[in-house]
Amino acid sequence: MPAAHRTAPTACLALADGSVFYGRGFGATGQTVAELCFNTAMTGYQEIMTDPSYAGQIVTFTFPHIGNTGVTPEDDETSDPVADGMIVKWDPTEPSNWRATDALGAWLARRGRIGIGGIDTRRLTRAIRQQGAPHVAMAHDPDGNFDIEALVAAARGFPGLEGLDLAKNVTCSQSYRWDEMLWSWPEGHVRRSTPGHRVVAVDYGAKRNILRSLASAGCDVTVLPASATAEDVLAHDPQGLFLSNGPGDPAATGEYAVPMIQQILRDTRLPVFGVCLGHQLLALSLGARTVKMNHGHHGANHPVKDVDTGKVEITSMNHGFTVDSQSLPSGVRETHVSLFDGSNCGIRLADRPVWSVQYHPEASPGPQDSYYLFERFSKAMTDAA
């Protein structure tokens, strides 16, 4: 074993059940408490760390090569990392990629996020699957001084994500216009220069590439905060309403989001499209229920079946709550199901262009099987005009 791997640990992870994992810290120093999940994606660690849907969570990466392509501002999904920390098997190496502007460790340190390398991530992933997403405390101290009892107590004191409205912590503070489109070679990100469908996107924790996908599909996007009312939405004379991804318990966010969505559905015939948390909020608005999952779905390789066509899409997912398909009311159809566990992955109103999916169709990171959903949304607005 290399000498660097025989040194005393500089970071540790304490689970609420008393289990402790030791490793080597990178990024910021200090301590954080959160829910622990695992992500199976082989690419896109920067997009994952900056995905607002990970608020309140520490991410275990099952793929070992994390950090080898460095980081670049172009790949941020929001201005700063939102996930509370990251856990990897192998220590991040120096970046080797022409787009890299910084190393992962330095980027995390500057953004105040802790990382731990040298962890048996397979063992940790099995623990998550077996006992559900555990509450944990993570610490990084270059001198290796840890109060394990205090860390375990902190993990046990974490309240969990049930009942928490985290969208209010990651949403925008005021409305803004978005016209930047998806990255393409060699121009990079270019901006829309032609008129498009007027879309209001409600930001419950929106990723930049979701907004770029809307722009690339022909939409002029106005982004509103999560607390937007129906009057706020309609003031922009939209042709469509988009409900974004986001973190936390959908029932908690639904206390203010559901009345807005219900009023839009009652008073207008606007096409409505939701993803992730937006999917769950639409389901709640239609009378369904949401439930906390054992360990959630987090990765870029999740097979989802289209119930109508039988087509299977490989999708990118990040959610710890799900819509209870047994609670869907009359007039609401289940359109997609997970082939991993049969959980609900999509709904649609039977007689109106109102639908949503649980996964992230913009595929950042992940496969691009589901991008057509943005084009379907654009066509629905054309048809409704």
Image: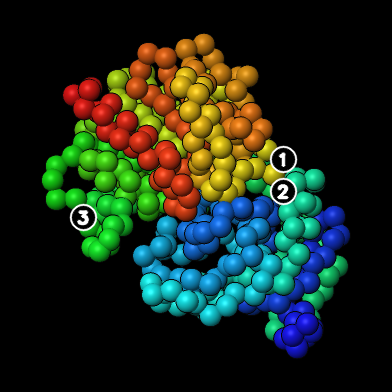
Relative to 164, does residue 352 appear above or below in the rendering? Answer: above
Say which amino acid is labelled 3: Arg
Residue 321 place in picture, x, y as percent: 61, 38
Q: Position of residue 46 (x, y in %)?
A: 49, 63
Label 2 sits on what residue type?
Ala
Q: Are marks 2 and 1 in contact (CB under 8 Å)?
A: yes
Q: Which mark is residue 255?
A: none
Which residue is rendered at x = 48% and y = 73% of the image?
A: 70
User: Callout 2: helix, strand or loop?
Assistant: loop
| Residue annotated with mark 3 | 191
Q: Check disc 2 and report the residue beneath it.
A: 133
- Mark before the other along the chain sequence, 2 or 1: 2
Residue 281 seen in render: no
Is residue 366 in view?
yes
Measured Cα–Cα span from mark 3 to mark 1: 41 Å
Q: Is residue 350 above or below residue 232?
A: above
Query: What residue do we see at 51% from left, 45% from top?
Result: 316
State which quadrant residue 251 falls in. Answer: top right
Alpha carbons under labels 3 and 2: distance apart? 40 Å
- Badge 1 is on which residue? 294
Q: Relative to the observer, which residue lies in front, 155 or 124?
A: 124
Tag 2 or tag 3, which sits nearer the N-term? 2
Q: Is residue 156 above or below residue 285?
A: below
Q: Say which label, 3 or 1, has the lower sequence index.
A: 3
Q: CA distance from mark 2 to mark 1?
A: 6 Å
Q: Quadrant of residue 67?
A: bottom right
